[in-house]
Amino acid sequence: MQASELWFVRHGQTDWNVDQRLQGHEDVPLNEAGRQQAAAAATYLQGLHATARFDAIVSSDLSRALATAEAIRGALGITAIETDAGLREHALGSLQGHVVRAMPPHLRREYDNLRTNPDYKSPGGGESSRQMYERVVRTLDSLPQRYPGQRVLVTTHGGWLFHAHRYLLQLSIDRSQDAIPNACICIVRFEPSTRAYTMKPSLIAC
């Protein structure tokens, strides 16, 4: 069986990204810069598609990821986008909509607890870091099974990719890591004979 290739794209920029406002599961749309970033990623991927075709597009069901996927879908001429809630951003509960540097003390304590305790969940439906990590692993591992031997474009979120990198690089759940820029591309190859992932060492910025 041939290897699967997964091309992960973080969604384009939103106004909340600019404000450094925590988005989580809030359905925040792309801003103008984000739409331009999605279009640039689509143009880059269209050039590759001419010689090495993408077979499918899968996206988080949040609109900022879906709009990024739709821009790419149009450029590649792929018929449909499959949505998967497993690709959503980290659910942050009562922290969603707040700017970290301007949080009132009780929310800042919640935020600090979330960052330092992998089992802490924010009130209001938040996920712990461990729950988020486990969701990312389940979703990522399902993709080569759903698309064996195929080249798949996946649009998702910074927090999702943050935990995916930990899994793929076998880092501890509390290991710090640089943020992944909007509309950057990360390529992962899954070899079914060894059930091993290989991630290209650098991100592609469009």
Image: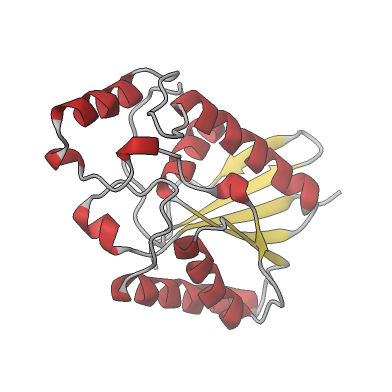
Q: Position of residue 184 (x, y in %)?
A: 42, 59
- Which sits in the foreground, 43 or 79? 79
The answer to which quarter of the image holds residue 98 is top left
The residue at 69%/77% (across/down) is 78
Q: Is residue 37 left or right of residue 48?
A: left
The answer to which quarter of the image holds residue 192 is top right
The residue at 27%/29% (across/down) is 111
In the rendered view of the protein, which quadrant contains the C terminus? bottom left
Furthest residue toward right: 1
Furthest residue toward front: 124
The residue at 33%/44% (across/down) is 96
Q: In the rendered view, tell whether residue 163 sits above or below residue 128.
A: below
Q: Position of residue 200 (x, y in %)?
A: 52, 48
- Which sits in the foreground, 48 or 117? 117
Number of labelled discs? 0
Q: Is residue 148 left or right of residue 159?
A: right
- Which sits in the foreground, 28 or 205? 28
The residue at 23%/30% (across/down) is 107
Q: Position of residue 123 (x, y in %)?
A: 38, 29
Q: Is residue 194 left or right of residue 136?
A: right
Colour scheme: secondary structure
Q: Position of residue 185 (x, y in %)?
A: 47, 58
The answer to which quarter of the image holds residue 137 is top right
